[in-house]
Image (tube, rainbow, N blue to C red):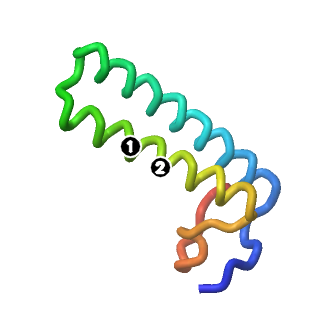
Amino acid sequence: MALECNIDARGQAARLRMGIIAVIGGGLLGITTFVGILPTTIGYVMTTSSIAGGLFSMWEARMGWCVVRAMGFKTKI
């Protein structure tokens, strides 16, 4: 899979927004886990997953490349 640009500016903006929201959501999950609202095991797994997914989405936006489109699926944006 080559990292050729396969999304336009609208797709990049959408992925960047999605990544920022996921990282902020992961931060909020981390805070609620630290405070004790969520159980530690599942809370930190959800926090790490959300932040990692958000960072990957922001990387996709920066590179202009989408892994789902690279696999042959058509996306609306």
Q: Estimate the x, y position of residue 13 in percent, counting from the top left.
A: 74, 46
Q: Amino acid at mark 2?
A: Ala
Q: Is residue 63 above or below residue 77?
A: below
CA neighbours of label 2 inside 10 A, class few (<14), some (14 to 19), many (20+): some
Q: Which residue is mark 2?
A: 52
Instruction: Out of 37 and 22, give the one closest to the viewer.
Output: 37
How far is the residue under mark 1 from the one under mark 2?
6 Å
Query: Which amino acid does the dot numbered 1 rest on?
Result: Thr
Q: Secondary structure at mark 2?
A: helix
Pick out the residue farthest to the right: 9
Q: x, y (%) of residue 21?
A: 56, 33
Q: Quadrant of the C terminus?
A: bottom right
Label 1–label 2 contact, CB within 8 A: yes
User: In what quadrant of the picture does the N terminus appear?
Assistant: bottom right
According to the picture, the residue beneath numbered tag 1 turns out to be: 48
Image position, residue 42 (x, y; %)? 21, 37
Residue at x-position 22% and y-position 22%: 38
31 to the left or right of 41? right
Q: Residue furthest front?
A: 34
Q: Quadrant of residue 19?
A: top right
Quadrant of res 64: bottom right
